Amino acid sequence: MATAKPTKTKKTAAKPARPRGVIKKKPNAYGAPARTRRVAPRRAPWPHLGHPSSAVVVTGGASGIGEACALALAEAGRPVAIWDRNDEGAERVAALCRSRHSVRAHAVTLDVADSSTFAEAIVSSANVCGPIGGLVHAAGIDGACMITDMDDEAWDKVMDINLRAAAILTKQLAPSLIENGPGSAIVYLSSIEAFFGHTFLPGYAASKAGLLGLTRSAAHTLGPSGVRVNSICPGAVDTPLLAPLLAIDGVRENLEARTPLLRLADPSDIAKSVRFLLSDEASFITGASLVVDGGLTAVSGI
């Protein structure tokens, strides 16, 4: 009785695993050559998800929106350098970043109106915090007075702190931002006053409108090097800067009533938007001005 011969199975060599990060695509129906596309590497879970590891310089970081930005970035695991003329406040915020979030933090005492101090501050910040890949220009003053009462000194002071410092810092930090990319980014703190203006804030409104122009120009220049530049335009925020206005009877209540969300912003509301624009989640956003005002500009200005 004949027995059936066992069938031979063809052995195939196992295909080597393709390294993550490169995927080859087959030629298309028209015979176009195969292309490759890059796949982003896997990242650690939040809070590091989508956040570069480079340090961020935060001007005006001793209080208000600047302080909130420093703490929000530290929460995401980013080292922060807090620059402010208020030395005690800067040291306090740096200590909070270290104790709460275990990140490197450095306090630098300077006045951003004096750009001659920037080079030394950049070196000391990098020595403590590591490579610098981000900038938040939150330092600012309102310089409240009508244009008919303003003198040269008052005008120049507002422009130097709010606008000129942002431009000079961008220039001086550009080599570091480019070197430590991809993922490097800049956020300027502008204002909805850039759109509306205010009779008592001509210098402030002009400087904040200037930041929007600087945003677009810097984004155009630095974009090809992988550095993104954006602005945040807050509305009414409960900060020391707005405190004198809010102390006037009825002003706070009036602002809250005219804001669709029926409240003023907390500094942390603005800081979360800044953190987003500095993250890889905003990797295709540059040259933009994001309004964060609870809907106030949808109906009126401050």
Image (cartoon, rainbow, N blue to C red):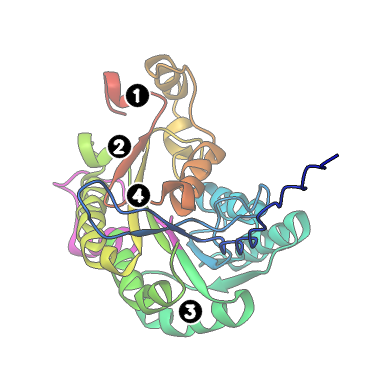
Tell me: residue 292, above or below residue 155. Answer: above
Q: Which mark is residue 192?
A: 2
Q: Nearer the viewer, mark 4 or mark 2?
A: 4
Give the residue at x 57% y 52%: 67
Counting residues from the N terminus, which is met first, the one under dot 3 or under dot 4?
3
Badge 3, how many Cα within 10 Å: few under 14, some, many 20+?
A: some
Residues tagged 1 and 2 counted as in contact (Cβ below 8 A): yes
Residues tagged 3 and 4 counted as in contact (Cβ below 8 A): no
The residue that label 3 is drawn on is 122
The three-letter code of the residue at mark 3 reads: Ile
Residues tagged 2 and 3 counted as in contact (Cβ below 8 A): no
Badge 4, how many Cα within 10 Å: few under 14, some, many 20+?
A: few
The three-letter code of the residue at mark 4 reads: Phe
Question: Can you give x and y, in whole percent of width and height, for residue 49 in the image?
Answer: 60, 50
Find numbered disc 1 in the image and state the secondary structure of the residue it sits on.
Answer: helix
Residue situated in front as seen by the camera: 171 or 96: 171
Badge 2, how many Cα within 10 Å: few under 14, some, many 20+?
A: many
Find numbered disc 4 in the image and state the secondary structure of the residue it sits on.
Answer: loop
Residue situated in front as seen by the camera: 148 or 287: 287
Q: CA distance from mark 1 to mark 2?
A: 9 Å
**Residue furthest to the front:** 1
Image quarter in which the C terminus is found: top left
Q: Which mark is residue 284?
A: 4
Q: CA distance from mark 4 to mark 2?
A: 23 Å
The three-letter code of the residue at mark 1 reads: Leu
Q: Is residue 255 visible?
A: yes
Residue situated in front as seen by the camera: 152 or 223: 223
Residues tagged 4 and 1 counted as in contact (Cβ below 8 A): no
Counting residues from the N terminus, which is met first, the one under dot 1 or under dot 2?
2
Task: Give, as a single range, the part of the protein colored magenta.
Answer: 135-162
Badge 1, how many Cα within 10 Å: few under 14, some, many 20+?
A: many
The residue that label 1 is drawn on is 296
